[in-house]
Amino acid sequence: MKKIVLAFLLIQILFCSLLLAQSSEPDLLRINQDRISMNSNGMLVLGGWAVTNIAIGSIGMTQTSGNTKYFHQMNAAWNTVNLAIAGFGYYGVRGQSADIGLSETITEFHNFEKILLFNAGLDVGYMAMGAYLWERGIRTDSERLRGYGQSMILQGAFLFVFDGILYFMSRAESSRLIESLSSVQFTGTALSVSFSF
């Protein structure tokens, strides 16, 4: 009878440890679905910004004059590129599979975050170029340069905030994933999983 009770307890302990191990593993499918959703929503926001700027800029450049006309003109032109990027980005993200492994998931997060940081650097460059054009327009009394410079500052600032928000959202998700793996250790000859109660 003692052997049966002991066997029963061992089976229960084994069963409980299997349940704990399963609950501590990250749900990669859900994580990747959330990552894809976040990225596609980001492309929708960029596309919405682009369409709004194209519409307002197209109307504004026909209804205004001076540097305001050129401000609207540059906003419309700049955002045709943003709209193309958003369209291709949305199409590319929506075509991704959420059913990928751990290393591919981490790679996807890492590559996206690198792109966002690179873009943030470009955004600062856009604002600096805009400030230069604006200042040069004042010195040379060029309404076109002033309007283009003001537009580039606005567009660069929006993109900087946009890329920064996406970066920190992605970073928070990838950090949670990496943190969930901290209980797993591989020494080269053994795999161990630690549980905290």
Image (cartoon, grey):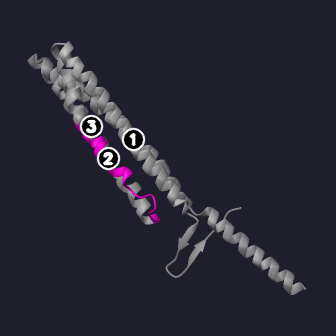
Q: How many residues crowd mark 2 within 10 Å: few (<14), some (14–19), many (20+)?
A: some
Q: How many residues crowd mark 1 within 10 Å: few (<14), some (14–19), many (20+)?
A: some
At 49% across and 53% down in the image, what residue appears? 175
Determine the secondary structure under disc 1.
helix
Relative depth, front residue between 31 and 188 = 31
Callout 2, which amino acid? Gly
Q: Which residue is disc 3 drawn over?
A: 82
**Quadrant hosting residue 20:** bottom right
The spot of residue 108 in percent (x, y) is: 39, 57
- Mark with earlier residue (2, 3): 3
Residue furthest to the right in view is 1
**Quadrant hosting residue 73:** top left
Q: CA distance from mark 2 to mark 1?
A: 9 Å
Q: Which residue is disc 2 drawn over?
A: 89
Region of the chain picked out in magenta, as a range = 81-102
Q: Quadrant of the C terminus?
A: bottom right
- Mark with earlier residue (2, 1): 1
Report whether residue 45 is seen.
yes
Q: Quadrant of the N terminus?
A: bottom right
Callout 1, which amino acid? Gly
Q: Which residue is disc 1 drawn over?
A: 42
The spot of residue 170 in percent (x, y) is: 44, 48
- Mark with earlier residue (1, 3): 1
Callout 3, which amino acid? Asn
The spot of residue 30 in percent (x, y) is: 52, 55
Relative depth, front residue between 183 and 73 = 73
**Quadrant hosting residue 40:** top left
